[in-house]
Image (cartoon, rainbow, N blue to C red):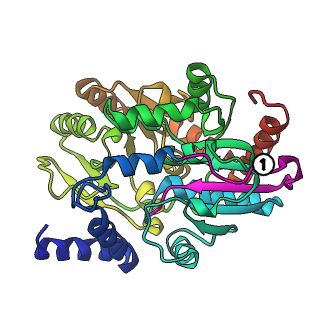
């Protein structure tokens, strides 16, 4: 990367996410190169060091685990950046456990750019919210705990090899092997489900999959909604039928290309449709139909954007994001891809489901456009579900599962 393009990249990240994010991204590139992998003394990619850091080794003093206080919980996470939904949920549950009397420690595994734990804490506060846990950096930060949670697959090996944890858990928010082609990363991430960790999962699809295919002892929490933030805003006059498309084209599992092809067919059949691309900048994509490139939006803008949409297309080849329920809370009808990983949250009377094929997906979208009664009925039902959803209730469920899996050692 030349100086001009590097400066441009720094400026784009700084504008969207702040100087802190831009500095950290630059640091990662300098240390790890464009591949994101560590470089050896020769300047070549050091695969062995990279994978040894993930696989870990036995660590922590062998102590009398019965002497550890029952309410000490340790969370081990991969490094974080701005706007990670997975990290947001981890921090959310950490705070809910703290409010319920748990003492917690947050261990951030390398690679990271934090000079000390206070710098990491400041970033969490700036990008998310203050986290109610002690923070430590690196494997040296592990301490004896009644429960230690792995989170991303890169943390699971270290957690499984920690001798000073009485119970070892895995907070699983997606089936991470699907993030990769068939590869070393696929196999290594899949193998983390065979380490004997107990799991609390985001949604029933993951719990059922890990239990049936890998024999894991599992229980599931669901998604909540911040209903004081996500609610319908007053409708504005609009001349077009607006479809909001969650367009994370940099994330392959979000099926951007299939959605784009389906929407091109929809717009060809109905010239009154305008597609609003949200979640990623599509300025570099050829889009020959009426559209608005909304890109990544600040959180404060989302409820009104959802409220002004006539239909939202949210696709995912793996587990759902929080978007369908948050969009539903704002009164917008939702259409998703027809798969088990998408169907666990909203029933048939609360959402529409389309085959993962452009022509058939376009057909279902056009059917919904032509049937406002169906859209309204499903939107009303979905909003009922969203309003009844609560993060506090899921926090109670999390503690209940933690207790059941610790004391009984069986599926909850």
Residue 177 in the image: state x and y as whole percent. Answer: 42, 34
Quadrant of the snapshot with the C terminus:
top right
Vertical comparison of 184 with 54: above or below: above
Residue 379 in the image: state x and y as whole percent. Answer: 51, 41
Residue 366 location, quadrant: top left
Judged left or right of residue 86, residue 264 is: left
Instruction: Identify the residue at image location x=55%, y=58%.
Output: 88
Which residue is denoted by mark 1 in the rendering? 396
Instruction: Identify the residue at image location x=27%, y=38%.
Output: 259
Q: In the displayed image of the protein, which residue is found farthest to the top?
A: 212
Residue 164 in the image: state x and y as whole percent. Answer: 73, 50
Instruction: Identify the residue at image location x=81%, y=58%.
Output: 100
Magenta segment, which residues?
57-80
185 and 352: which is toward the camera: 185
Quadrant of the snapshot with the N terminus:
bottom left
Q: Can residue 398 be spotted in the picture?
A: yes
Q: Residues within 10 Å of mark 1 (few under 14, many from 20)?
A: some
189 and 203: which is toward the camera: 189
Whether the magenta-drawn stretch holds residue 77 is answered as: yes
Vertical comparison of 21 with 189: above or below: below
Label the magenta part by its dominant secondary structure.
Answer: loop
Judged left or right of residue 191, residue 7 is: left
Vertical comparison of 199 with 25: above or below: above
């Amino acid at each position: 990367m030349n100086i001009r393009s590097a400066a441009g990249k720094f400026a784009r990240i700084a504008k969207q996410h702040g100087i802190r994010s831009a500095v950290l991204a630059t640091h990662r590139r300098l240390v790890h190169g464009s591949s994101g992998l560590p470089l050896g003394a020769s300047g070549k990619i050091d695969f062995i060091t990279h994978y040894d850091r993930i696989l870990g080794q036995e660590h922590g003093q062998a102590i009398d685990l019965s002497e550890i206080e029952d309410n000490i919980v340790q969370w081990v996470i991969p490094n974080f950046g701005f706007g990670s939904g997975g990290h947001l949920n981890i921090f959310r549950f950490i705070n809910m456990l703290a409010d319920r009397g748990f003492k917690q420690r947050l261990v951030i595994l390398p690679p990271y750019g934090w000079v000390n734990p206070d710098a990491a804490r400041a970033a969490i506060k700036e990008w998310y919210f203050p986290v109610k846990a002690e923070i430590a950096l690196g494997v040296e930060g592990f301490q004896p705990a009644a429960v230690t949670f792995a989170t991303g697959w890169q943390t699971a090996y270290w957690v499984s090899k920690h001798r000073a944890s009485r119970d070892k858990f895995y907070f699983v928010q997606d089936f991470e092997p699907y993030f990769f082609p068939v590869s070393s990363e696929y196999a290594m991430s899949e193998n983390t489900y065979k380490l004997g960790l107990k799991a609390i999962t985001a949604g029933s699809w993951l719990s059922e999959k890990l239990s049936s295919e890998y024999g894991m002892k599992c229980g599931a929490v669901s998604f909540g909604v911040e209903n004081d933030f996500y609610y319908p805003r007053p409708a504005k006059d609009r001349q077009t039928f607006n479809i909001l498309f969650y367009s994370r084209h940099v994330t392959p599992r979000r099926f951007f290309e299939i959605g784009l092809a389906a929407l091109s067919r929809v717009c060809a059949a109905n010239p009154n449709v305008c597609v609003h691309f949200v979640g990623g900048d599509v300025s570099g994509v050829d889009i020959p139909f009426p559209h608005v490139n909304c890109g990544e939006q600040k959180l404060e803008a989302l409820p009104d954007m959802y409220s002004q949409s006539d239909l939202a297309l949210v696709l995912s080849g793996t587990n759902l994001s929080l978007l369908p329920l948050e969009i539903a809370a704002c009164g917008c009808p939702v259409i998703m891809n027809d798969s088990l990983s998408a169907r666990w949250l909203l029933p048939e009377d609360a959402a529409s489901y389309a085959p993962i094929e452009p022509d058939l997906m376009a057909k279902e979208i056009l059917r919904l456009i032509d049937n406002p009664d169906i859209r309204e009925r499903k939107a009303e039902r979905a909003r009922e579900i969203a309003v009844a959803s609560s993060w506090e209730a899921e926090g109670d469920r999390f503690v209940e599962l933690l207790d059941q899996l610790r004391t009984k050692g069986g599926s909850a």
